[in-house]
Image: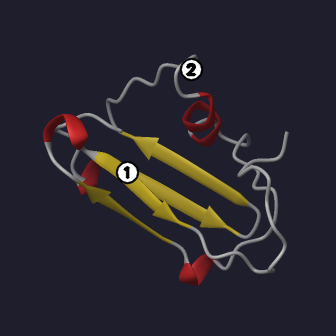
Amino acid sequence: KIGPTVASKDVRVIFKTSMLFINIKDFAIDPVRSPMLTALTTAGKGNLLGPIQVDESTWCLSGTGAERALVITLTKSTTTSWQTLLKP
């Protein structure tokens, strides 16, 4: 979940074949409650477990108020099952 006032223009999502990076303007992330989001917002730390199809991956904002969320859909390049999103 993200802040209730975050707009699409405040969000930047970069998809690369083996990396995902997120930047949300003026949004403080609690690293204890959201370690994955912390990794995805730290340059060079969002290394995905496997490759994705960049052109087929998307993001959007969903919900309102306290239920506002950033939804990211990744399309994997392989059918291999991932146990986690990010490389350890």
Marker disc for residue 29: none
Q: Position of residue 42 (x, y in %)?
A: 62, 35
Q: Is residue 19 above or below residue 58?
A: above
Q: Is residue 52 left or right of residue 15?
A: right
Report the coloring of the rendering: secondary structure
- Residue tagged by mark 1? 70
Q: Is residue 57 above or below residue 40?
A: below
Pointers 1 and 2 in contact (CB under 8 A)? no
The residues bearing labels 1 and 2 have C-alpha atoms spaced at a distance of: 17 Å
- Residue tagged by mark 2? 31
The secondary element bearing badge 2 is classed as loop
The amino acid on which the numbered mark 1 sits, given as a three-letter code, is Leu
Q: Is residue 78 above or below residue 86?
A: below
In the rendered image, which quarter contains the C terminus? top right
Q: Quadrant of residue 41?
A: top right
In the rendered image, which quarter contains the N terminus? top left
Q: Position of residue 64 (x, y in %)?
A: 15, 47
Q: Is residue 24 left or right of residue 73?
A: left
Q: Position of residue 23 (x, y in %)?
A: 46, 43
Residue at figure coordinates x 37%, y 51% from the top left = 70
The amino acid on which the numbered mark 2 sits, given as a three-letter code, is Pro
Residue at figure coordinates x 81%, y 56% from the top left = 49
Residue at figure coordinates x 21%, y 50% from the top left = 7
